Image (tube, helix red, strand yellow):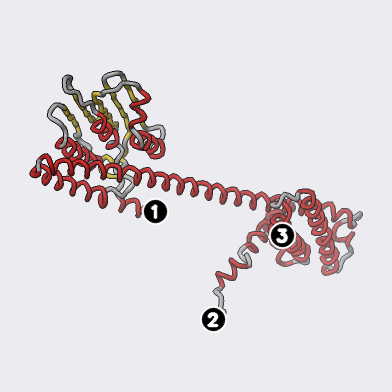
Amino acid sequence: MFSTSPQSWLIKYKLYHIPFWLLYHYLWWVVAIANPVKAAHAILFTPFAIKFGFYVVFQVLAVYFNLYFLIPRYLEKGRFTEYIVYLLITICSAALLIIPGYYLTALASKQTVQELYGSGSCIFGFLGNSLPSTLATMTFAMSIKLTKNWIRTERRHQQLEKEKLETELKFLKNQFNPHFLFNTINSIFFLIHKNPDMASASLAKFSDLLRYQLYECNDTQISLSKEITFLENTIELEKLRLNNNIEVSLFINQQNTGHLGIAPFILMPFVENAFKHVSRFTDKPNWIRIKLQIEQEQLTFSVSNSVSQGPFKEVIRYGGIGLKNVQRRLDLIYPGLYDLDIQSNMTSFEVSLQLNLSALVSSHTLQKIA
């Protein structure tokens, strides 16, 4: 019940750090002796292993005391003066505790300190070695710790930004879908009184559109050909409830679009606004013109309509959640990859969108990548 696997013990007590610190100090000895074989022999088969052990043990204790006690308790809480004081005490204490290792090494070698380390060797000379070494080790360990914390913070920040964008995109998409549904239902309700047969046909189209909206476009990217089909069906549905004095022209060039993908419901708000706000003159032409072209991977989409009122701000305002919604989604999904131009005058309103698309990535492929 209370058994713990060896791997969990290694992680819990950070025993996997031991080989790292042994290698770290061994490399310092290699630099000092300038011979990796002699350094390994001295550490493993001579009394110098005692001095080596003192360096490893007390410097590692100082490192972890700093990382897991001083930094969380003082540095991270803004108590900088206390942190610096305790850090200096820790470094000096570790350096002083290393010095007995020199004397024990001489004792184990059955030599005097002067015989082993040279004449003039004393505690201050040993401190001149252990203190800079301890300071370098502490600095090195803090650099690793701070770098790891920075990387972890950056990853967390990126994850939060990603989650924020995904949440905002879902909100914007959900904000648009009911808007479209209510408009379509109103269209069918209008047709029930005007032409029941036509209402039946429109209800069938609405069923297909609803199925598309609920089941086929939940991914972040869908086939461009499907989006175009959805657009065509929607336009046909909207045309059923228009008066005969409104001319609707549609031109779509979708050759070689099967490999391209697009975010769902990017194009529809422009069409919806055109149908909603087209002029209703009885003595003048009323028209809606929709044009979609694909050249390589660039989509050019324009929607224009006649209007009853011309002020530019009024046209922007009547878009409501439509135009603002889709422009925000374009900013989030296609940053730097689109150009949106809105033109208005006293008689017409036109939206032109140029969008750089990419090859469609299926959800199955995305799961494999993830």
User: As rendered, which of 289 and 321 lies closer to the eye?
Assistant: 321
Is residue 48 left or right of 162 when viewed as pictured?
right
Residues at marks 1 and 2 touching, judged by CB atoms closer than 8 Å: no
Residues at marks 3 and 2 touching, judged by CB atoms closer than 8 Å: no
Q: Residue 322 occupies which quadrant of the picture? A: top left
Q: Secondary structure at mark 1?
A: loop
Q: N-terminal of the two: label 3 or label 1?
A: 3
Q: Residue at x 65, y 64 (%)?
A: 18
Disc 3 packing (10 Å; few <14; some 14–19; many ≥20): few
Q: Amino acid at mark 1?
A: Ala
From where the camera sits, is residue 42 visible?
no
Q: Position of residue 84 (x, y in %)?
A: 78, 50
Reading the image, the residue beneath label 2 is: 1
Reading the image, the residue beneath label 1 is: 370
Q: Quadrant of the N terminus?
A: bottom right
Residue reaching furthest bottom? 1
Q: N-terminal of the two: label 3 or label 2?
A: 2
Is residue 103 left or right of 215 when viewed as pictured?
right
**Alpha carbon separation for disc pair 1 and 2:** 35 Å
